[in-house]
Amino acid sequence: MLFLLSMQRRMEVFKVSFYSPASRYRTFTSCKSLFARKMKRTIFSVVSGLKARSVAISCCVLLIVSLTLYLSLMKNIFPADYLPVAKDKLLRQSINLDNTLNFGARPQVQTITSWKAPIIWEGMFNPNLFDQKHIQSQSSVALTVFAVGKYLDVYLGNFITSAEKHFMLGLQVTYYVFTDQADKVPIIELGPRRSLKVIQVEKHSRWQDISMMRMKTISEAIESEIRPHCNYVFCFDVDQEFKGRFGSEALGDSVALLHAGYFNVPKDKFTYDRNPKSKAYMETGDYYYHAAIFGGLCDNVKDLADYCFLGIMEDKLNNVEALWHDESHLNKYFWLHKPSRLVSPEYCWNPGMNDERDIKVIRLIWAPKYYDKLRTR
């Protein structure tokens, strides 16, 4: 009973205190203060969010402007190949093409030398990859050929016409025709980025002298005519005909051709010059090379031509003539200065040979020889 009376008095005191003006004012003030604090926190949160969003937007705009200015600056400083958009092109240009060769593609034949120079056979290379790389590098090739005396009438037209179908297609090619009858050089329609230049030369009384003196002529032509316009030079005999692709896979610093008659015979059968009195004298060698085709970078071919010419002239002073003339001196040069690239007999095949087991593609053949009618004694 006492407990109930106590609770009743407390409730009456609460009612009086709650409904009194002073109490109501304190309650109102307290609520107003609480509301103000909550509103302030809310507004601060909203403003802070807007500020953060504004800062983020500003940062994005600044980043975009900075990247634009940076790329513009890089474009002016560096070539296009260094920009990210040219990454694939740059990678293609940096490829060492010899690393793409499949040396195991032809197990029946030798595909690499003891000094790690490749020997190019059908099936070892990707022709599209080689062509794309050399087109991008803007490789240009000079082809030299001698058409003296009756050789011009019999061989030159077919040689150039067949070269237009198969030799270094897609690249810039300049034919340099050395002849003693410039007015008789046939007019042949050439493809895009291909041209022909005729150079008058002296006619020698013997075919041996014509063959040997071509080295001097080639060296002089590289110095005066070829080097300013071409990266590579290939030297050919005119009595040949192109039959298949003779492409950029053959290009290299220094290129030698394996002779079709000796690529698969023992070394003791090689017909090196065995005369110790000749500058071309050799006891042994690596391979037997054919002088019907040789090539490489202009400076390297000039070095070869100069070496052979000096050897020939020294032999003449000693009344000596190498067994196979300039070819003997060429073999001596490649024995002392290893070629960086060898091309297989596919690149100069003798159709009279019976064993063609290793020849999957014939790229160039020996034309019929009419030595008794064409050569001067």
Image (spheres, rainbow, N blue to C red):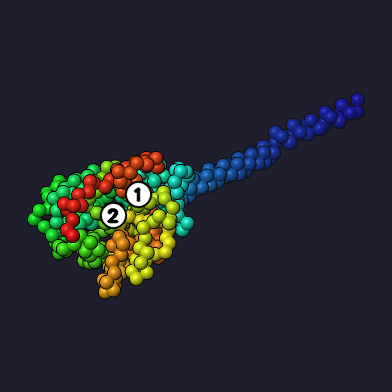
| Residue at figure coordinates x 42%, y 60% from the top left | 285
Q: Is residue 90 above or below residue 278?
A: above
Quarter in which the N terminus is drawn: top right
Residue extending farthest to the right is: 1
The numbered mark at residue 292 is: 2
Identify which residue is drawn at 43% across, 56% down. Answer: 268
The answer to whether 242 is drawn above or below residue 288 in the figure is above
Q: How many residues crowd mark 1 within 10 Å: few (<14), some (14–19), many (20+)?
A: some
- Above or below — where is 321 with respect to 175? below
Q: Who comes first in sequence, dot 2 or dot 1?
A: 1
Q: Viewed as shown, does residue 90 lie left or right of 6?
A: left
Residue 196 coordinates in the image, percent (x, y): 17, 54
Q: Nearer the viewer, residue 201 or 314?
A: 314
Q: Is residue 200 left or right of residue 214?
A: left
Q: Which residue lies furthest to the left in this view?
A: 183
Q: What element carries label 1?
A: loop
User: Can you give x and y, in whole percent of width and height, for residue 230 in the image?
Assistant: 26, 58
Please name the amino acid that badge 2 sits on: Ala
Residue 34 shows in the view: yes
Number of marks in the rendered image: 2
- Can you name the residue that lies furthest to the top here? 1
Q: Which one is nearer the viewer's eye here, 2 or 205? A: 205
In the image, 235 versus 365, the foreground residue is 365
| Residue type at tag 1 | Ala
What residue appears at the point 42 percent right and 64 percent down from the top-left corner?
283
Cα separation, mark 2 vs mark 1, equals 11 Å
Asked if marks 2 and 1 touch (Cβ < 8 Å), the reply is: no
Residue 260 is labelled as 1
Q: Residue at x 20, y 52 (%)?
A: 371
Identify the element where label 2 is drawn. strand
